[in-house]
Image: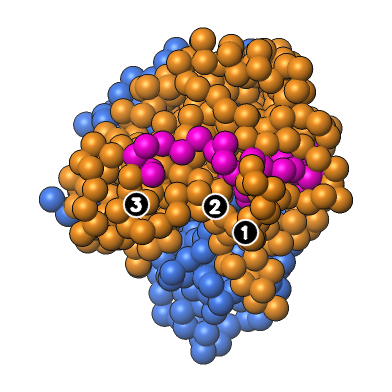
Chain colours: A orange, B blue
């Protein structure tokens, strides 16, 4: 059987089965944004890796090495933020084409360094190999999380509201602009969505505020797409979800770029992915308090975009008119 | 400037400078086999990553996925063993060709699982991406080490003896056989060197025995080659070394394969690499006791192969006749 028949998530489920039950020191193994492990101290070790492959995740001619370095760090910080943790140390594996220039590697590390400084992370190790083909950047980030702050994908309960930080859809708008650079739209808006795509800001302060509040029940970051990532929460929590499509926080920038390109920004918001916003759930009587707290502590707005329903109802996106959107549970899936 | 002009180790030095001084929680950053970090507990966190790239580190038609899985784990375990630590959890990043078969991935994980079970390591996370080219396996291994057991590359002192576990040169003999499969030599010997190449045994028990003894001053694993890895110890310790070429522990198998192929087994032992033996130093009055202790506790022989000399004398391999071997400080170096 080909991997493409199984799909990325089918393959991950198969691997989780092959790998078997871990030791009791492992609090969270395969199946969440990061793994969590007991060490001798008061806090858990939390760690994750993320790989960026030329021609799959990025095109070398379209992203600068500085941007690529920043993004490689940011997407890992986001995975730790989405579980309530604090990132600490980074390891970097590079597979470099033989003809790569030293200046390219310098700029890549300067980008990583800019982003690690921002989150007080140290680059402590790594590995370099020659590539017979293109560039691969694999980053591994370790950090810590207090047991009481740890937020998993598996805690959502029927009746909870679904909340999201910031805006969704900007990164997909940025990607659409990269692929269609001739499109004419407002320059400020264009810059904004391109920044969202090339140098996303992980929601670390927001993740800590949510985790410390003790009010949220589940959390994930929006990397595969709002619907797909909500799907991951639903699967691990054994629930379904209804998304209120008209309440999705679209930015003016994404709307403007969509108009210029003749696209539907709602599709970007639902299925675009790579927004690195935090998607989380909370009981309805706590959601407003939690949203206000995050906004007060970080300046980032939080929007309620749906509710958790029984598993039998599946995952649906509905409009205020009652219309159910004919969307598949989309999102990025390697090998599909 | 091209990376090939700088070489792998020049590039690592440049990156270490770009990355700058880490936080006080970091005990060992870039420049040793693994990084070491203080956590809240009694033990340090020790972690390392190692990448295997198709066409560079392996040929997909020459190594089975089961062997590749075992090797990916073993070489990381070796890096933690060489600093005196104990491995605990593994993360796996895979970049898979679109046409890969599920059976291939199954066998790869079965190989990893076989090796992780052997060392009581759990596979707890990872990442899968599609490859537009070949296969890449990047593994990240975390473990722990007691502060008093930690052994660095930087502790060797003038007068220390240089010791090595087991045999060196078998892996290079195995590689030579893979590249020249028509060669006729003893079947048992052939199998032995092929096993050393495809499924090396990391010296974890030996590393722990050496570390706990408190008798060694520096340690590294033989991945780049005996001379090159001794060079890493010398560089970090600010010393030189004299290797007694005639005392290098060559196996009968390596000698036999060398004879069949018309090669010099000494060159494999000095510069072949990928033996994953432990190369360590100890004061002359402790070396014999240490070698006996390792042999008693693990069954693995230890051989004294040279001595540490002042930095000005450089690194030389000499024969009993007094002849200085005309070898460069060889060993594997990406981008050279």
Q: Nearer the viewer, mark 3 or mark 2?
A: 3
Query: Is disc 1 surrounded by few (<14), some (14 to 19) or many (20+) residues within 10 Å?
Result: few
Q: Which residues are magenta?
A: A226-255
Residue at the spot 77% in from the left edge and 37% down from the top edge: A308
Front residue of A297/B70: it is: A297
Q: Residue at x 51, y 64 (%)?
A: B130
> Which residue occupies 69% across, 48% down?
A322
Mark number displayed over residue A271 = 2
A60 up-or-down from B216: above or below: below
Secondary structure beneath dot 3 equals helix
Q: Which mark is residue A327?
A: 1
Q: Is label 1 or label 3 in front?
A: 3
Q: Are marks 1 and 3 in contact (CB under 8 Å)?
A: no
Going from the N terminus, do you reach mark 3 or mark 2 first?
3
Picture quarter with the C terminus of chain A: bottom right
Estimate the spatial distance between the alpha carbons at disc 1 and disc 3, rounded to whole Å: 20 Å
Instruction: State the residue position of label 3.
Output: A259
Q: Is residue B304 above or below residue A175?
A: above
- Queried whether the magenta region covers residue A242, the answer comes back as yes
Inter-mark Cα distance, 3 to 2: 18 Å
Q: Nearer the viewer, residue B20 or B63?
A: B20
């Amino acid at each position: 059987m080909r991997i493409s028949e199984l799909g990325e998530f089918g393959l991950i489920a198969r691997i989780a089965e092959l790998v078997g039950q871990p030791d009791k020191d492992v609090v969270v193994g395969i199946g969440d944004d990061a793994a969590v492990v007991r060490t001798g101290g008061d806090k858990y070790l939390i760690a994750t890796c993320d790989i960026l492959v030329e021609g799959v995740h990025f095109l070398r001619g379209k992203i600068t090495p500085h941007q690529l370095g920043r993004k490689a760090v940011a997407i890992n910080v986001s995975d730790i933020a989405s579980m309530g943790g604090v990132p600490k140390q980074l390891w970097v594996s590079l597979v470099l084409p033989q003809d790569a220039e030293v200046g390219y590697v310098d700029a890549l590390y300067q980008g990583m360094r800019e982003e690690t400084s921002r989150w007080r992370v140290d680059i402590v190790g790594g590995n370099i190999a020659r590539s017979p083909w293109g560039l691969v950047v694999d980053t591994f980030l370790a950090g810590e999380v207090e047991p009481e702050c740890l937020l998993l994908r598996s805690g959502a309960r029927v009746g909870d509201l679904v909340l999201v930080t910031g805006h969704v859809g900007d990164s997909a708008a940025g990607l659409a602009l990269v692929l269609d650079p001739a499109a004419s739209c407002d320059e400020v808006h264009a810059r904004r969505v391109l920044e969202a795509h090339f140098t996303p800001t992980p929601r670390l302060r927001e993740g800590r505020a949510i985790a410390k509040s003790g009010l949220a029940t589940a959390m994930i970051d929006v990397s595969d797409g709002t619907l797909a990532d909500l799907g991951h929460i639903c699967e691990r929590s054994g629930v379904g979800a209804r998304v209120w499509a008209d309440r999705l926080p679209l930015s003016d920038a994404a709307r403007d770029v969509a108009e210029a390109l003749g696209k539907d920004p709602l599709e970007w918001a639902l299925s675009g992915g790579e927004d690195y916003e935090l998607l989380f759930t909370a009981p309805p009587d706590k959601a407003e308090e939690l949203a206000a707290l995050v906004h007060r502590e970080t300046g980032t707005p939080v929007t309620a975009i749906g509710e958790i329903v029984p598993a039998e109802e599946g995952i649906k996106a509905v409009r205020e008119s009652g219309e159910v959107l004919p969307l598949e549970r989309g999102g990025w899936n390697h090998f599909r």
